[in-house]
Amino acid sequence: MMEKVASYPDSLTEKKFHYCPGCTHGIVHRLVAEIMDEMGIKEETIGVAPVGCSVLAYDYFDCDMHEASHGRAPAVATGIKRVHPDKMVFTYQGDGDLASIGTAEIVHAANRGENITTVFINNAIYGMTGGQMAPTTLEGQKTTTSPYGRNLKEAGNPIRMTEMLSVLDGPAFIARVSVHDPKHIRQAKKALRKAFRLQKEGKGFTMIEVLSTCPTNWGIKPQESLEWLEEYMMPVYPLDVYKDIEEVE
Amino acid sequence: MMEKVASYPDSLTEKKFHYCPGCTHGIVHRLVAEIMDEMGIKEETIGVAPVGCSVLAYDYFDCDMHEASHGRAPAVATGIKRVHPDKMVFTYQGDGDLASIGTAEIVHAANRGENITTVFINNAIYGMTGGQMAPTTLEGQKTTTSPYGRNLKEAGNPIRMTEMLSVLDGPAFIARVSVHDPKHIRQAKKALRKAFRLQKEGKGFTMIEVLSTCPTNWGIKPQESLEWLEEYMMPVYPLDVYKDIEEVE
Amino acid sequence: MAEKQLMKGNEVIGEAAIRAGCRYFFGYPITPQNDIPAYMARELPKYDGVFLQAESEVAASNMVYGAAGAGARVLTSSSSPGISLKAEGISYIAGAELPCVIVNIMRGGPGLGSIQPSQSDYFQATKGMAHGDFHLIVYAPSNVQELADLTFKAFNVADQYRTPVMVIGDGMLGQMMEPVEFMEPIDPDELPKKEWATDGAKGREKNVINSLALDPRDLEILNERLQDKYKEIKAQEVMYDEYKMEDAEMAVVAYGTSARIATKAIDMAREAGIKAGLFRPITLYPFPEQELAATTEKIEQYLTVEMSAGQMLEDVRLAVEGRRPIEFYGRMGGMVPETDAILNKLQEMRGE
Amino acid sequence: MAEKQLMKGNEVIGEAAIRAGCRYFFGYPITPQNDIPAYMARELPKYDGVFLQAESEVAASNMVYGAAGAGARVLTSSSSPGISLKAEGISYIAGAELPCVIVNIMRGGPGLGSIQPSQSDYFQATKGMAHGDFHLIVYAPSNVQELADLTFKAFNVADQYRTPVMVIGDGMLGQMMEPVEFMEPIDPDELPKKEWATDGAKGREKNVINSLALDPRDLEILNERLQDKYKEIKAQEVMYDEYKMEDAEMAVVAYGTSARIATKAIDMAREAGIKAGLFRPITLYPFPEQELAATTEKIEQYLTVEMSAGQMLEDVRLAVEGRRPIEFYGRMGGMVPETDAILNKLQEMRGE
Amino acid sequence: MNEEVIMAGFGGQGVMSIGQLLAYSGMKAKLEVSWMPSYGPEMRGGTANCTVIVASEKIPSPLTTHPNSVIVMNLPSQTKFVPKVKEQGLVVKNSSLIDEKIERDDLTIIEVPANEIAEELGNTRVANMVMLGAYIAEKEIIDLDIVKNSLANVLPERHHGLIPLNEKALDRGYNLVKEPASV
Amino acid sequence: MNEEVIMAGFGGQGVMSIGQLLAYSGMKAKLEVSWMPSYGPEMRGGTANCTVIVASEKIPSPLTTHPNSVIVMNLPSQTKFVPKVKEQGLVVKNSSLIDEKIERDDLTIIEVPANEIAEELGNTRVANMVMLGAYIAEKEIIDLDIVKNSLANVLPERHHGLIPLNEKALDRGYNLVKEPASV
Amino acid sequence: MAEVKDKTEVQNKKMVVDEERCKGCGLCVNVCPVEIIENAEDRINQNGYHPAEIKPENQDKCTSCTQCYQICPDVCITVYKE
Amino acid sequence: MAEVKDKTEVQNKKMVVDEERCKGCGLCVNVCPVEIIENAEDRINQNGYHPAEIKPENQDKCTSCTQCYQICPDVCITVYKE
Ligand SMILES: Cc1ncc(C[n+]2csc(CCOP(=O)(O)OP(=O)(O)O)c2C)c(N)n1
Ligand SMILES: Cc1ncc(C[n+]2csc(CCOP(=O)(O)OP(=O)(O)O)c2C)c(N)n1
Ligand code: SF4
Ligand code: SF4
Ligand code: SF4
Ligand code: SF4
Ligand code: SF4
Ligand code: SF4
Ligand SMILES: [Mg+2]
Ligand SMILES: [Mg+2]
């Protein structure tokens, strides 16, 4: 008999993802679902879906799900968590959602040490709306709203939310990971699992920034996207653990 | 004949301040006005007044002034500066204004390296509205919305905006100063002058956080407020230059 | 418990909410309603409730969205500019059909305006709060006792219809003290469980709180459900009050503080031989349209009095439909109508 | 220049704005209006203008506030939820009496809703945009050429009255392509200098842009000035259009895309022997109230058609004041009215 | 009966408290009452004032344009409010701090050296109670005992130790009117 | 004349471009025109479609519930739109990708092996032009020359090098209808 | 669980693709260390994609390393070990 | 500029307080190194504050160090040097 060694996680519903071919949103969904499976928490978890390509995340995760308005997932999650402090609450947000319109909400959820986990998908672009510049868009990167390439003089530098939030006292764990190859995917999962575990232990705010691709709006093929991520995004967004309450303690 | 060595600056109007007795908002107003005098820029400066006790700053500074909605002074200033890049533009904001409701606006103005100067009055409380907890309120400090003292578990740690914004690439100069005694007032002025000069030179975003008092809502006398600031605020908000483009260059 | 207390309107809101089983408050300071968060900050911990000062009204609105979705009775309060910031979130709450209570203690506008009492957010509260076809149930108490009763009721009605409910007052009502008697408190643990809430999918299908529909027809179906709900609310929930209307020939239409002030002018008018009465909408939405329309049988002239440029006036006109003349007297920017001026206006209309 | 171009509605807005001398755009992406910022990002640099993608609609609204205060012709655009977020800032802009142009390319609501075309922000645009007694002038073009003309006009009118002006369309109008001819461009440097702007107090008294008044009477005076302005606007700026109204016995009242669709139904009705016509408000505020009221002389029945649950309907009722029956046909949530359905409705009303 | 009184003074003079005390006492006495503070932007140094209405009928408006009475604790208050008092109305005036004469001659004017009396009692902060005592004596709408019994309901718990002092201050003001000789 | 046509296919098949080309050509021919894309949430992998109306009178609605014609580039499009075509209407069908029969028998159906022809021309991406060519030939509302002359107005500058290829593709489609023998 | 997932066991393959879920992105193709995955040239699924597959002759070469599962953004792959 | 500012020169004082601006906060009192500033006990200004003053007999002691000017939140102080 054959033994299953890797298969569709229980914490995902049957719905097919609507993501474009090769879009790594799906990998991150799977990782989160696997963690829910492994921790056995899908019946005690409430996920908060953002406004962004992952807006339909509420269709995919097989746990209670709550829509947020654009950028406000951390506030919505705060509302939920304060009502159910014993439940697991996570937000899943894009870079437009978290690093632009939702800046105040993520900063203050982090600063309060709100006991939630944020999965932050940095794909250096607004995917959902058709490829506008994000605060995380790279220098020179062309988007529909930076048609001549991002100009730092006008638009500023790509913002590093992970570094910025790690300065605060509230977060228990913040790390940046990537999902451009299986090795990094495994590391990403490790980081995500730790974030969920720390939440379970009531340690405070945790966030995992995941470098992710948007083949459609980057205008390149899925495989090239993984390479572009590694070559261009990683130097600007170094992978590392930026805050770890367990190392301090 | 006697020679004037210190007198009412030209860049302040005749209007009496409405601030409470001993409130250090007035000191900072004077410093900013003196710098306008010394740089001879009052006819080319546009100030942006916040919503907070200093809402009437537009009555006091003898230059063009623009009201902002609560927290959005950096956005208003951005609008002005983009129209008049050759003019000097500053915002004057409280801690509720800048560190709470206006978090996204200050983070992004800073990140864009918007060529404006922000004077940030941290008095660890909402003065204007009668003494609510600010994000900068100290641990255990009693306010009308933290009647049992600020509880870090519920409300998070006092936020250090200066440290947080200094992580970004956009800012040219960020420092924290205090105005609780003449020596520090002189240092504060030096920092403010540098911020204005760097703006003049087009170097990007500059911000000076000024530790300030609110005798009324702290519920103590003006002199005691200066002491409280020194004793309790300064350890939580260390004075220093946190970002200086000139040191890097 | 049934003993009368002398309390400030704002604090009464807090107390009535707690008695209605509300254990969650998310808000952001703004004058003239700061006593509400202060009261909640002081009292909620005594009930193991949560007071959280949000980073902004936008965040507060979305915390309410989350907490309401999670099944709680939840309150937020603000004043005019702050309500404008909550608008997007309120649209989501309405779209996701969640119950919650929102208090607006109005001040003068537009912009930063003034902190003095005003009623210039009527349109916002009853019509164009935000994008999309939705309504709030809007209660407009005119004294502190009514503030207590309607705040209490608001939570029940919100749950009943799964809809956000607004209690609207002005700075004066929020700041004044009057005697008040409270309802018996409700224990939130005894309230019926909300089967649709996001509180963990143990032993059931997952719940989703949502206002998005990719297919516009699905969204239309949601909208049809909302419209049916509003029809039901119009049929069931209209509230209004009359004062000396039995034999009145002229009616003042006013709500909230303006209505209180008008009663005095009406007494004065009666003394001066004018048969005036007061028609006071208590629900601004649903507006007592039919009830007001019915008065056109006997009433010859109407005077609408508001602390605004004339907003409810449109609903009065919609009810009266041109059958009788309607005049308007309003003060703006934080100014309060004067009894003398109302009286004068009534006399003038009478051709006196 | 006068040659016709085939252009998308959204891009036409951008081009018309630039021709009207607008050199500043602050906005935040949202479907279905993303071609506007994209166009501005591409074109404005060619004119030394500034395109800035703000961190949010709230910020964009306040950037516009600053730029308008600083004397510029400035544009922002968004769609329904984004407009809700701009509301507070718009109230400030109106309170400070600043000119600017705001575009709302409406989508289905409430909440996140859908991105399909809708007209359910009528109330928001014309009545309760935000706190306080203020109005925007609201233009509702119904084809791409009109989009160009009204956007262009909006900047002039905004400056003339020192008031924010909204151009409102729906996703369909924004997305469609039609031939368009543009006005001759205005050189912004040749526009009259705004003496009140915050552009540095060289050689003059300082200027202050502000909406706050500590004394409520001062705020009332500002409000009176605003109301006077609105009265003037009502007298001067009403725009509407009629189609086959000369001999009509039934009138469809509709604006924007709904109005286009209605014309076809009207043609069909005429073929079926029903004398129908179209009354199309072009300014939603000021609503052509008197002009519509005047039609009650000949029109026997009205049908209001909207992509909403019936919002303009209230303004139609206010104009008709019960003198004639008014029916309503609307679609919601991104659904578009069908010509057949309008025709049926007309026939039904005719008792056919 | 419909008594409308405005109480005004500097920020710290306790006019809000005596207003609440009067309103509370009225409620205890089964009368209709309302208390309405002025609330300006939180800008200090101005005058504070409140309007109290005590009536036998429902109170239409908690505000009044023409009060029956005013209690003025300082000069700006006198300047602002005395002109608004109804004809034949009452002014209770803190003569310790107000030298300026009142021009109107239709009014009943009670001069109360409130600060001096309070100082005699050992605490200037009860000057407000002295003023209220005088007002109660003159108006006779509520029993002084009810007022005294209401102190515990109105003063914050931490000041309950000061109730006897406050009662004494009320008495002194009351007696000033009732037994002017004895003062 | 009032021609309402829906063009539909997979995302990359260029239906939007031929729609714009038809509308532009109509404009050049002094006709009234409108072009209206479907715009869904930016979720990929679905079908894209646009509605073009070319008319001699003003166009009331840029949408149509019952088009006179459809151009379908793939099966889902055929499934979705063919049932909506007006009676006696026209279907131009990409027979390279669609095997499925059309059940309705009132329609004029033109089968265009567009991908094959485009491949012959060396670039599958001009399959859309082949389809349009066939449509133009069948409908005869606009001269083929006007369509060709409009290419430069509609194609992005960087593709202007491909204009001759596009013209060839238009011709091939056109001739397929006009001179079926010659194909 | 999708019915399709269990087809494999019957088929006795080590790596099975849920073909209707697959979007043919090719990421699994690139990641397989033994280079046995390809996008089926001969067929498309209902959404028009060429699904990933391992030709029968290559099934044996699969090491069950799960790399393909890890990278697949649409979670179409199940991997078995003997 | 306020008229009052020039009164001083006439008065020939080194440190002059704009008494109507002064809020009697006492910060200048505390900061003066030679401890010559006090809040006038005998008078209040229009706003009810006891303005800061230097008694005539102490005027000479002023070192014109400007500390009082620096700390004054209401910018009421002008300092002269001989
Ligand atoms: C208030 C509001 N503003 C804007 C939008 C439009 N919008 C939808 S998603 C999105 C950004 C998506 O980008 P990101 O968060 O990076 O997610 P991604 O799609 O890249 O995963 C925007 C601006 C909206 N729905 N609501
Ligand atoms: C949108 C909005 N929310 C809230 C308020 C009320 N408000 C006015 S000032 C203020 C905070 C003032 O605190 P801070 O910024 O620290 O300034 P300070 O008064 O302490 O100098 C608040 C919450 C407002 N005017 N507008
Ligand atoms: S648009 Fe980009 S982020 Fe969105 S689903 Fe497609 S590839 Fe992924
Ligand atoms: S309330 Fe505080 S911050 Fe405001 S003026 Fe008074 S002392 Fe200064
Ligand atoms: S499990 Fe490993 S070896 Fe087998 S197909 Fe997948 S990647 Fe290739
Ligand atoms: S990675 Fe997944 S979706 Fe992509 S080709 Fe392979 S199996 Fe298909
Ligand atoms: S200048 Fe110096 S010495 Fe003179 S009064 Fe001021 S603090 Fe004292
Ligand atoms: S510091 Fe200024 S305001 Fe304070 S007492 Fe001295 S002079 Fe007066
Ligand atoms: Mg993104
Ligand atoms: Mg503060």
Image (cartoon, coloured by chain):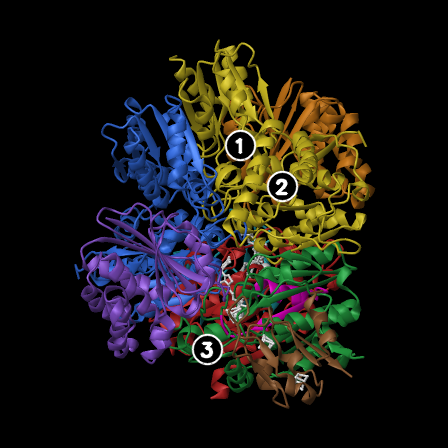
Chain colours: A red, B green, C blue, D yellow, E purple, F orange, G cyan, H brown
Q: Amino acid at mark 3?
A: Lys
Visible in this render: residue G5? yes
Instruction: Provide the secondary structure element on which disc 1 rests.
Output: helix
Q: Amino acid at mark 1?
A: Phe
Q: Are marks 3 and 1 on the same chain?
A: no
Residue in the image at 70% along x and 71% along y: H7
Kindly check if marks 3 and 1 are in contact, taking CB atoms under 8 A apart as contact.
no
Can you name the residue that lies furthest to the front here? Answer: E181
Return the x and y of residue D265 as percentages of the image width and height. 51, 20
Q: Are marks 2 and 1 on the same chain?
A: no
Instruction: Provide the secondary structure element on which disc 3 rests.
Output: helix
Q: Name the one closer to the observer, E33 or F165.
A: E33
Spatial separation of the CA atoms under disc 3 and disc 2? 54 Å
Visible in this render: residue C110? no
For mark 2, does the 10 Å Cα neighbourhood hold few (<14), some (14 to 19), or many (20 or more) residues? Answer: many
Spatial separation of the CA atoms under disc 2 and disc 1? 47 Å
Instruction: Provide the secondary structure element on which disc 2 rests.
Output: loop
F160 left or right of C242 in image: right
F173 left or right of G71 in image: right
* Quarter the N terminus of chain D occupies: top right
Nearer the observer, disc 2 or disc 1? 2
Q: Which residue is mark 3?
A: A194
Q: Amino acid at mark 2?
A: Thr
Q: Which residue is mark 2?
A: D163
Figure quadrant of residue H68: bottom right
Return the x and y of residue H9 as percentages of the image width and height. 74, 75
Residue in the image at 79% along x and 67% along y: B40
For mark 1, does the 10 Å Cα neighbourhood hold few (<14), some (14 to 19), or many (20 or more) residues? Answer: many
Kindly check if marks 3 and 2 are in contact, taking CB atoms under 8 A apart as contact.
no
Circle on res. F81: 1
Spatial separation of the CA atoms under disc 3 and disc 1? 51 Å
Q: Which region is colored magenta?
A: B103-125
